[in-house]
Image: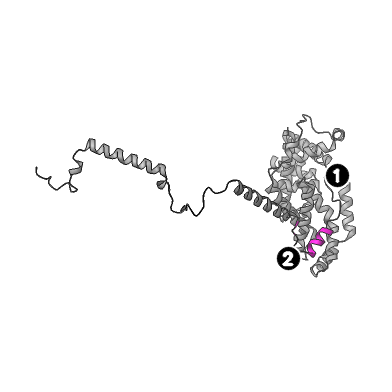
Amino acid sequence: MNCREARTEIALHLGHDESLPTDWEQARRHLTICPACRVHYRDLKAAMAVLDAADVEPTYEVRHSLWPKISEQLANPSLPTPRRMWAPVISFTIACLLFLGVWWNPPRDISPQSPIDYTTRSLESAPFMQGLNNLKESRERKFREQTLPDARTEPEDPTEAPPRK
Amino acid sequence: MKPKASLAREYQTLLDQGSNASDARLVEESKRGNREAFGELVRRYERRLVRVIGRFLDDPDQIDDLAQETFLRVFERLEQFDPARRFSPWLFRIGVNLTLDYHRRRKRRIWGMLFSDRRSETPFDPAQADRQDQSDLQREVRAVIERIPEKYRTVLILRDIENFSTSEIAAILDRKEATIRWRLAEARTRFQELWEKRQ
């Protein structure tokens, strides 16, 4: 038996859970020749004593029988089950929060006098973008006039001969 | 580690109240619509079920709710119950699974945050523990158990705290007994390591 097997047997033996008495006998023989496993045995025994000492009484006991509530639930299945009782409360809270959110932040302008087509409206149609486009076009025009003075007379087809002067 | 007297008494009470045969009879009567028969099953197992659930959770209201839901699920699924098998492992399987599902969902709330930072350099002396505040020790142990991975923790709680036998745990968790033994050994070793390293 190696250390790993011996330690499994030690852990089981300390809770009286060994499957066969011979398993513990083999582990016990291993303990006589293995100091590390002897230390492990002592530590594990101490830890299990803690477990035993700590749990004198349960932390919680049922005070009243659950049967009246269960019986009521069985008689009327439409009643919410215990853990689902929170669902309506949570739903109602979320609905209230949504309502308050909309109430405090109404849509800016959705009156019929100034219809806004949100489906086709894009950034391109925004006033500041129109201004930017105009500026860009005028700069391009100025650049072309400065760098390509003959651009206006350039033929569409480069293979075509220039007009005679 | 010897069986706890209170648990042993409770086992005896359960045995006195009715054998597996009478459990099966009550289940059959419940299936036929006899609510009182089901009520008898509830009264027979509610204390034990609530206590088992309470080993995994710390909220009394939630413990009651989960126990109640367990019995409702059991009632809904009575037709699926195999009468050739024992009723109690089936009941506790449903209860433990519901509890673990709930516990996984609210994993963020860990008991471990509440614990003192006492550290013992010497091996534990049970006589010394008697002088300690028992609830402090329970909380500390609980915090250490909480740090053990779920599949080992569940076995440790059911065997070493709730005193189910390994064969009962195998039936509750629907695993082979050999698997339960292996997990139990691993769980005890991990508990020991964490107990020594606790801060």
Residue on which disc 1 sits = A57
Task: For the N terminus of chain A, give its image quadrant.
Answer: top right
Pinpoint the chain carrying mark 2: B
Which residue lies at the image location 65% right of the left edge and 50% below the top edge?
A94
Is residue B77 rendered to the left or right of residue A126?
Answer: right
Q: Is B46 above or below relative to B84?
A: above
- Marks 2 and 1 share the same chain: no
Dot 2 crowding, Cα within 10 Å, few <14, some 14–19, many 20+:
few
SS for dot 1: loop
Which residue lies at the image location 86% right of the left edge and 51% below the top edge?
A63
Nearer to me, A110 or A40: A110
Residue B47: x %, y % from top left:
84, 53
Tell whether position A71 is magenta.
yes
Q: What is the span of residues highlighted in magenta in the rendered image? A: A67-81
Going by the numbered disc 1, the residue's amino acid type is Glu
Q: Is A100 above or below relative to B32?
A: above
SS for dot 2: helix
Where is residue B21, by image quadrant?
bottom right
Going by the numbered disc 2, the residue's amino acid type is Gln
Whether residue A35 can be seen here: no
